[in-house]
Image (cartoon, rainbow, N blue to C red):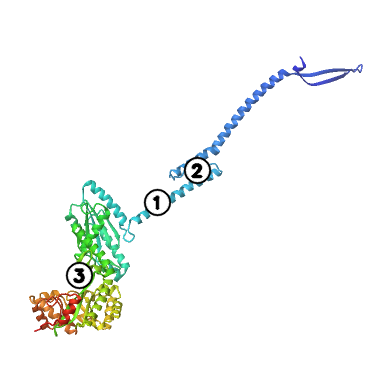
Amino acid sequence: MTQGERAYFSTARISITSRASYEKTYFYYNIALDKKKLLTTLAKNRQQFFVIIFFVTLLVLIILRIIFFKTLISPLDLLMEQIRKIEKQNYEQSLSVQTGDELEEISKNINQLAETVQDRERALLTSQKKLEYLSLHDSLTALPNRRLFIRRLQQAIRKARRNCSQLAVLFLDLDEFKQVNDTLGHDIGDQLLTEIALRLTESHEFNPLITARLGGDEFTILLDNVAGKNDIAATADQLLKIFRAPFTCSGYKLSTTASIGIALCPDDGQDPVTLIKHADMAMYQAKETGRNHYSFFSAELAASLKRRIDQTNALKKAVRDCDEFHLLYQPKICLRTGRVESTEALVRWQSASLGFVLPDQFIQLAEESNLIIPLGEWIIDQAFRDFISFQQNGSPVKKICVNVSGIQLINSDIVSTVQQAIKRTGIRPEQIELEITEGSLATKEKKALQALDRLRAMHIDLAIDDFGTGYSSMSYLQHLPVTRLKIDKSFIDNLTTSEESNAIVQAIIALAKTFHLHITAEGVETEEQVKFLRKAGCDEIQGYFYAKPLSDEEFLLFSSTFTAALS
């Protein structure tokens, strides 16, 4: 064996001493290993070792994986599943991770988060539903509001179009509701609206698709599958009956009525805006016919309302410039002297766009729009100027009479208006007579009564126009500062043919004498009427028998030369 094939690990010497000769004998030995065998054994052992290491490592890895899966992967999967459930808006409580460490705490927090998110979403949903309800319902009466009514009306129109059926929009407005607010307060007015809404919804007399409050004292009712106008008229009658019994509000028994306008689909409109607008127009027509009534929309009504709008716009322009108005003067003849001692100023409107507009039309329109206030100021100022001109040019006229609207008494400072006109023109207060309609004088508006007292304190005469047609009574004549009564033309017309008119005229004259008031008869057109009135003790007359309303030049000539032949 060569040295390269052996491996020497040690060399030893052993000495042995003989007891007999005491000689030492030395032995030498070498310990050697077979290197090839050793390498083979080592290689084999190394291979076994690596196999063992591999399987041990594999086992450890498997054990570690199992431990890792149980302690980390599985909990993380559960956590992700919890998160995915929340993402899908599934807030049911999930199985919590049971690891006893931070992952378990996170899992519990995720469950709490899900619960919190669910509570907040429920609160948000509730809040959204509440906000949607509030946005679609009236806060006072809880009825659907305009927005919801229009939405339902749009749906009903589409359905009616598919089914070739009719539907009706009823526009209901309370009569004189403003008086309730003004006299009893808005709290009582709100209670009244609530009670009315309750009756409308609880009534079994009709079955509306929806009943809504548009605002103020306006309500709308939608009827579908209507058979025709007779069917709708019957429903409107039932609605009006709802208002027959008084409403109890904070101890007050309040009686009110309503006016109803009706528009049909498709005849009167095929969209919500048009139908509501036309029903509204028809409602105003119902009010003009006496209130507590219903009216259907029609093409004639639309044309009338268009004329009214055109007149209102033209009137606004005319009042702004005051270049389309002029005054006529109707002489008032004294039955004692036969002379013209006073005259009434009458306004006329020659519109650039509409032509001549009757006084009854534009005066009422001016009152409704409050345009009577600036128009009345112009009339007062111009009449005072013309009166001064009459006197300066030799007219014997002693007094100018000007009509004043109740709107001017209540909604403007009429006293200041008259005072300023006096300063500008130089007319004396005792040369002025203001004529107020009987209805205006019967008002209980404190401001109007105070204005009348102040005007009379200035020595301005006050006349009740159209006496006998309104609300006057003995108590009013005792307390109002009036100086003259004017007998309405309706009594004069039948004076010589109707015993009733005859008796009324004589009673009015006697009443005026009792209260020491002057008396004027309007609309005198025959000699028989003149004789009767003079005999009955009337002070003065005006009418076509002696003169129609005249221009300022015509009046100046007439008043300067005329003397009635009284017999």
Res 359 label: 3
**Residue 530, image x and y in percent?**
10, 80
Find disc 2 in the rendering and name its residue.
Answer: 96
Q: Do callouts 1 and 3 mark residues in contact (Cβ within 8 Å)?
A: no
For label 1, the SS is helix
Q: Is residue 305 above or below residue 419?
A: above
Q: Identify which amino acid the numbered label 2 is placed on.
A: Ser
The disc, 3 or 2, on the residue closer to the chain's N-terminal end is 2
Q: Identify which amino acid the numbered label 3 is placed on.
A: Pro
The disc, 1 or 3, on the residue closer to the chain's N-terminal end is 1
Seen in the image, is 258 located left or right of residue 526?
right
**Residue 559, image x and y in percent?**
17, 80
Find disc 1 in the rendering and name its residue.
Answer: 125
Q: Can residue 398 be seen in this view?
A: yes
Residue shown at 46% from the left, 47% from the top: 114
Label 1 vs label 2: CA separation? 28 Å
Q: Residue 493 lies in what quarter of the image?
A: bottom left
**Residue 462, image x and y in percent?**
23, 80
Mark 3: few, some, or many residues within 10 Å (few <14, many ≥20)?
few
Mark 2: few, some, or many residues within 10 Å (few <14, many ≥20)?
some
Label 1 vs label 3: CA separation? 61 Å
For label 3, the SS is helix
Q: In the depicted view, which residue is nearer to us: 94 or 497? A: 497
What is the quadrant of the N terminus in the image?
top right
Label 3 vs label 2: CA separation? 89 Å
Seen in the image, is 364 located left or right of residue 528?
right
